[in-house]
Amino acid sequence: MTHTLLSNAFLLAITLQSFGAIASQEPLPSWHNTQSKQTIMAFVKEVTNPNSTNFVKKSERIATFDNDGTLWAEQPIYTQLLFAIERIVALAPSHPEWQNKEPFASLLKGDIPGALTQSKTAVNDIVMAANTGMDNETYHALVSQWIKTAKHPVTQRPFTNMVYQPMLELIRLLQQNGFKTYIVSGGGIAFIRAWSESVYGIPSEQIIGSTVKRTYALHNNKMVIVRHPEMDFYNNNSHKVIAINTHIGRRPIAAFGNSDGDMHMLEYVSKGKGARLSMLIHHTDKKREWAYDRQSEIGKLDKGLDKAAENKWTIVDMRKDWKVIYPEPIKPN
Amino acid sequence: MTHTLLSNAFLLAITLQSFGAIASQEPLPSWHNTQSKQTIMAFVKEVTNPNSTNFVKKSERIATFDNDGTLWAEQPIYTQLLFAIERIVALAPSHPEWQNKEPFASLLKGDIPGALTQSKTAVNDIVMAANTGMDNETYHALVSQWIKTAKHPVTQRPFTNMVYQPMLELIRLLQQNGFKTYIVSGGGIAFIRAWSESVYGIPSEQIIGSTVKRTYALHNNKMVIVRHPEMDFYNNNSHKVIAINTHIGRRPIAAFGNSDGDMHMLEYVSKGKGARLSMLIHHTDKKREWAYDRQSEIGKLDKGLDKAAENKWTIVDMRKDWKVIYPEPIKPN
């Protein structure tokens, strides 16, 4: 028994040293020590301090993140739309009817802007044709494979390296402080799930997104979940609040977004009682990323900027608050 | 430092002793050592054994449980329907129109069977009128309060003591072996969430159930989630598989149900590759609970019994497999 106790004491000492090492590392190393970082650190300290009136027990420490433009780049076009466009091109040989049918015809002639603006339903038509008509496991494998090889059209980086390093650190900081971190995205739930665990460290069941209609049905002699070309739930604006209610059933205490589509989620969080953190990522860095807000077609941030002050939302200035944008060095897919 | 280490060693010894106490306790103490228990134990051993070809990593250890009739009693009538009936009676003074409107009129005359069978939509009409028209937080508080005082009409037990002790032990065994345990119920998701954490040890975000339409809207001068009297998603039959896909995005490796409404979920699990556990709770205990299956209006189990053998589903015989049905002694609410 003495021997065991001594060994355990030794192990314990090792463990304590390891904790010391973690504690001594500066948190959020890719963030400049500006107001944004200080706001995050103060919030985390407050809600995890058992002596604070704002202490929040672990089960209630829920943080929700938008994805496109909040956790990874969304310019010049959403990643899932690029996936869809590439897939339409790949599928074209078995769809001769697309040659004379918009928006596919324009797309196959290489006129992407023309295709996307053909009609009000053009983007939806392309996304549905590319992301459905197969079972869910096949789709998962397809996206997993694509994300391993596809490159961003401007930076030529893998898309999994178009994630924001400061946000990866923020996710990790919250997780280390007992938070359950969720993605609440307008993107397809199954698209994100194909890579979220390896890229963000966020598991499948903590992804909330848009869904297509699915049925449990016999397909190629197997009972599978079949994906149909019809929207089931579009997870944007106030729908994000409803989806949070459906999936989580608790009001988050922290939320992160970057566009007007995230306003309702941020408001839902900031109107809760106690210490709350609602943050907007403002794309201000033309040199290292993109600069856009009120006039942008993608990730428009207009009303959100106006409402930020009265609601005490923190605006992250990418240019001033972040030391780096993307992970360096670039990790292979 | 020496002093600290010694103290820690002492604490560690205490902790190890506690673990020893847990480990030496017979698992599933309320289960007889019959085929059902042996099947559960063999499955858990197999999927948690790193040297087994059927080993399953923790993130994939998902178990899904139906609620009514699987985790707690559903006779003579679903608990949520009793809640609804009581609430209609309580609300009646402010709804004079109900006196002449079915199914409310029959209900208010005390004719419950007559009310429920008035029309095809009678049950839905009662449930909708009772469970909506307020914000989500008010509803949560209402159900939480009701469940603390309401008693089962036959046994006079609190409903929270109409749960099955052997199933509580099964949930705990799976959790202790790294499983994430979910409820996948035809009942209302918000109804279950009001008490699932304290009764089952299953948190809000691991409850999947039926939903009503909700909007994020201004209500009594506050932005809240308002519950509307219209079904959004009815979580039964093959819909349970779709809901599992939406909420979890992984195929569970274990599923537990008791009626034909759980067949698709059990099939979805048992058709997966590797060691899988699909179980049907068969209500065979007229003396201690209820005995019903093929002819029952509530919790009908007919096709499920026929399909069990070919699909290698385990049928739990409540009378023969369970030493006790409910927790003893009865815990106060």
Image (cartoon, coloured by chain):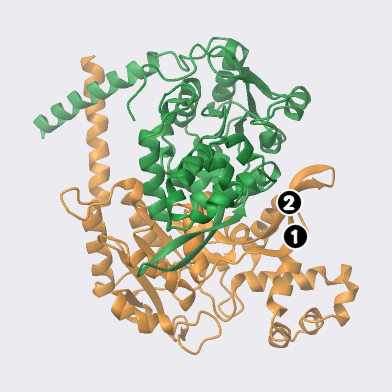
Chain colours: A orange, B green
The N terminus of chain B is located in which quarter?
top left
Q: In the figure, residue A139 lies in which quadrant?
A: bottom right
- Amino acid type at mark 2: Thr
Q: Residues within 10 Å of mark 2 (few under 14, many from 20)?
A: some
The secondary element bearing badge 2 is classed as strand
Q: Are marks 1 and 2 in contact (CB under 8 Å)?
A: yes
From the viewer's perspective, is A312 left or right of B66?
A: left
Whether residue A203 is visible, yes or no, is no
> Where A265 falls versus B290 (above or below)?
below
Q: Return the mark for residue B98.
A: none
Q: Return the mark for residue A228.
A: 1
The secondary element bearing badge 1 is classed as strand
Q: Position of residue A203 (x, y in %)?
A: 51, 50
Q: Residue at x 61, y 32 (%)?
A: B255
Q: Which residue is mark 2?
A: A215
A234 or A103: nearer the eye? A234
Q: Position of residue B296 (x, y in %)?
A: 68, 27
Label whose residue precedes the other's in the sequence (1 or 2): 2
> Where A112 falls versus B140 (above or below)?
below
